[in-house]
Amino acid sequence: MRCEQIDELISDYSVGNLPRRVEERVREHVSTCRACAVEMERLELVMSAVEEEMTPVEPPVGLWNGVYNRISSPKRESVRDRVGRVLLRPRKVLSFGIGLATLAIVAFLGVSEHRQQVVATVSDPAAIEYVQSHLSVAAGDVFADRVSLGFAVSLSAEETRDQL
Amino acid sequence: MQHEIVKSGRSTDGPVELVDVDLVRRTKSGDVKAFEELFNRYHKRVYNIVYRLIPDETDAADLTQDVFVKVFNSIGKLRAEEAFFTWVRMVAVNICRDFIRRKPPRTDSLDAAVQFEEGEVRRELPDTSGGPEEALLDGDRKDVVRRAVKSLSDEHRVVVVLHHLEGLEVAEIAKMLGCPVGTVKSRLARARDDLRRKLGPYVDVG
């Protein structure tokens, strides 16, 4: 190995960053070459100088005041933090889910029952006849719900037969 | 709550000192006075870690405060109370790295070599920051060394500070920075190379 190559490898050698074979060749060369040995020593002296001269400095006065003011002031919780706090609590999430499901079931049942009740209250024949004629007219309307109207008409027709 | 109070090595007439573990526990339960004591014990060391990584007094002061505010707010998560300073040091290094990442990037890499047809050439851009030579004219070796370390790239300076000034092993640094051991070794080697070239003329080889 030439001295120029060794010079490029000295720093890697000093931190153990070379493949073993290359490391051995560098070591062999340095043990026999005075100039490269001096460079190796120079590197070690430079790093020692760095460790000696980078002595601790005094921090500026008043650092604690800044820290104290910040840790003492009331924290504002962001919307994100608040939502995260709620969503990350399993019990609350479960309770919320059960409540929502219950509400949905009650609402569904309530609407269904209400629909049937609306159809079943007409029993007077005159009223039934009135409803039938009204429903027939309404069926011609563009926006009429033909399925529910047809259902209502058939039910009121059954009522009329029963009455008769 | 019972607190363990351990006497220091002083005579029984002297004041009783609390060990860090006790101060950490008190801080966890909201005792700001206990945290102030921890601050007093460690703020100089933290400031010097930060200042060596971010060699600007104003930035270093601000970042040191950021470190302690973060420590206070997160201390509840610290399980190994006896490793308090190890954890604080990691917080300091992470805050410094975040600060470095937020800095405007250099448009030109000083480490990359330039390719020519004839081969590769290392860049040598003029250093206008006032190199070691200027400090030497003032006769202050300390200044020479500080300027040389300050002139390192951010990546190189971090590993030099952690290894040579904080005394951390390469494996510890790799774990702290979240990178392979080989990467830390490469950065350390390049940093040493850089320092050898800048400071080599100023050391006396026997």
Image: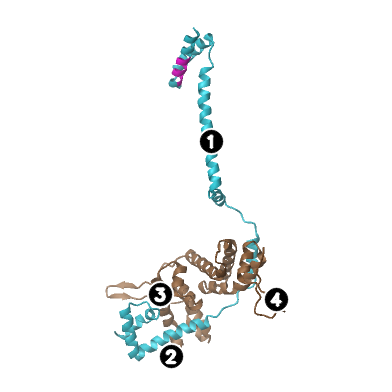
Given the image, what chain letter belongs to the residue carrying mark 2?
Answer: B
The magenta segment is A148-155
What is the crowding at mark 1: few (fewer than 14 residues within 10 Å), some, or many (at least 20)? few
Q: Which chain is indicated by disc 1?
A: A
Of labels 3 and 4, the one closer to you? 4
Does dot 4 land on a helix, a strand or a loop? Answer: loop
Q: Quadrant of the N terminus of chain A?
A: bottom left
Question: What is the letter of the cyan chain?
Answer: A
Please give the chain letter of the residue carrying mark 3: B
> Above or below — where is A13 with respect to B94?
below
Marks 2/3 in contact by CB < 8 Å: the verdict is no
Q: Which residue is mark 4?
A: B15
Whether residue B59 is visible to the viewer of this picture, yes or no, is no
Q: Secondary structure at mark 1?
A: helix
User: What's the amino acid at mark 4?
Assistant: Pro
- Give the labeled residue for mark 3: B185
Please tell me whether mark 2 or mark 4 is closer to you in this view: 4
Q: How many marks?
A: 4
| Chain of the residue displaying label 4 | B
Q: Colour of chain B?
A: brown
Q: Position of residue B189 (x, y in %)?
A: 40, 77
Which residue corresponds to mark 1? A102
The secondary structure type at the circle numbered 2 is loop
Q: Nearer the viewer, mark 2 or mark 3?
A: 3
Ranked by sequence position, the earlier of labels 2 and 4 is 4
| Distance between mark 2 and mark 4 Cα atoms | 50 Å
In this view, the residue farthest toward the bottom is: B206
The residue located at (46%, 88%) in the rendering is: B203
Q: Amino acid at mark 3?
A: Lys
- Amino acid type, callout 1: Thr
Q: Which residue is mark 2?
A: B205
What is the spatial separation of the Cα atoms under label 3 and label 1, in whole angstroms? 62 Å
